Amino acid sequence: MSLEEALKLADEIVFEKTGQHLDDLQQAVLQGTLKRKRYRQIAEDFDYSESCIRGVGAELWKTLSEALGEKVTKPNFRSAIERWQNSNILNLAQDVVVSDSFNICEKERHSPDTPNSHQPNQQKSHPTQPATPHQYLDEMPELGDFYNRTTELETLTTWILQQHFRLIALTGIIGIGKTTLAVKLLHQIKDNFDYVVWRSLETSPTFAEFQADLLQFFSQSQQQNSLENTQKPLPLIKYLQQHRCLVILDDIHHLFSSGELAGKYKPGYEEYDCFFKQIEKLSHDSCLLLIGWEQPIKLAQLKSKKTPIPILQLTGLDIASATEILRDYGLTEIDNWEKLIHLYQGNPLWLKSMATQIQELGENLIELLPDDAILLPEDLKDTLQQQSDRLSETEKQILEL
Ligand SMILES: Nc1ncnc2c1ncn2[C@@H]1O[C@H](COP(=O)(O)OP(=O)(O)OP(=O)(O)O)[C@@H](O)[C@H]1O
Ligand SMILES: [Mg+2]
């Protein structure tokens, strides 16, 4: 980016934020900064005191930091502004922030043709958009080692960013890697959104509790952007219509009854269905990704021939990635693992559990096992039991056939 381009962009950003263009002195400070001059040198060039120039600089960095959503300083001004240009999110559509006043400097030795148009700012409200999205991710697990899933990531990214599906489901058996895949996805695409939210429904919150929690997040985020915001929180769907949000709801099977047909809501939880329908039917740019062992039965009813609700059924990892997992667990005799990986269906959780057991009991244990015997560590038994307990009698009978 040339010096002129950087100055022009800085001027636009400051104008959006404060309602005032850069004055001559501010331009001089930015110009000197871009030419890697020290404050003292800039002060000498423009016949101001060094402290005055420093003060102007400090106010500029503050304003730019607020506008760009990252800490801007003299050393990183150029790179920050280039990042801003690349992220291409100079948005002129939101109400925002009242700016602080700049310093007013008196020239030490006044000369008529040196810059002195530096005026205090008027307080104004101006639109801006965060450089990074507002995030509510405290329930999102950290991403550990991650192998492959390239195709699945591409599919989900296309559905969300190119096809703009509003409601998407990610499903699969326990431990297959749904949560991990979604975490990776979120890291990759979050900058396309104003808000990114991750909630787990493991504690089975009622819809009222869930909505209140998200409303608090949205209204707090908005108050950060507006010092005088006294508005009452809107219904959740309104926030999703007003802003581009990515909301990931994990463990949604906790909304459904155990021992019933998969995806049947527990009594008192049907309100979620109404919310999911709103997400699907109303017009907005947000996306809700539902993750769980089961998906709501009624999701199928939302399908129409023209716009089916996309559901990604996750299957096991490929041999190469599954082998990597076993290698991470220090299993060295991995030439013969292909058969075992098939037996465990490439399920990363099951592979990890089996690898831990083998580490404890010794690698030659596998050779002692009869063909096709599955080593089922206790923790694995528990997790499989949890999932099988949820099946209805009919579903159990079908599985036994
Ligand atoms: N692509 C991957 N590469 C490496 N490890 C993975 C991958 N996917 C999942 N894992 C590991 O497998 C384990 C299970 O993954 P995860 O919790 O994402 O499964 P899940 O389908 O969400 O399970 P649940 O149904 O219990 O919620 C985790 O330890 C995770 O780190
Ligand atoms: Mg999970």
Image (cartoon, grey):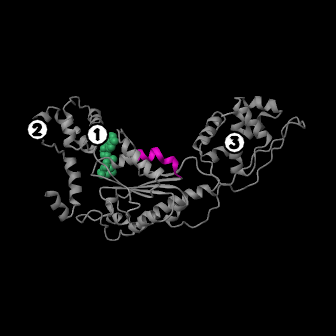
- SS label for mark 3: helix
Spatial separation of the CA atoms under disc 2 and disc 1: 24 Å
| Depth check, front residue: 161 or 44 | 161
Residue designated by label 3: 10
Could you tell me the amino acid type at mark 2? Leu
Dot 2 or dot 1: first in sequence order is: 1
- SS label for mark 2: loop
Magenta stretch, residue numbers: 183-193
Dot 3 or dot 1: first in sequence order is: 3
- Residue visible at 49% across and 57% down? 286
Residue designated by label 2: 369
Dot 2 or dot 3: first in sequence order is: 3
| Depth check, front residue: 139 or 312 | 312
Spatial separation of the CA atoms under disc 3 and disc 1: 49 Å
| Depth check, front residue: 47 or 26 | 26
- Where does residue 123 sit, x and y in percent of width and height? 73, 55
- Residue visible at 19% across and 50% down? 381
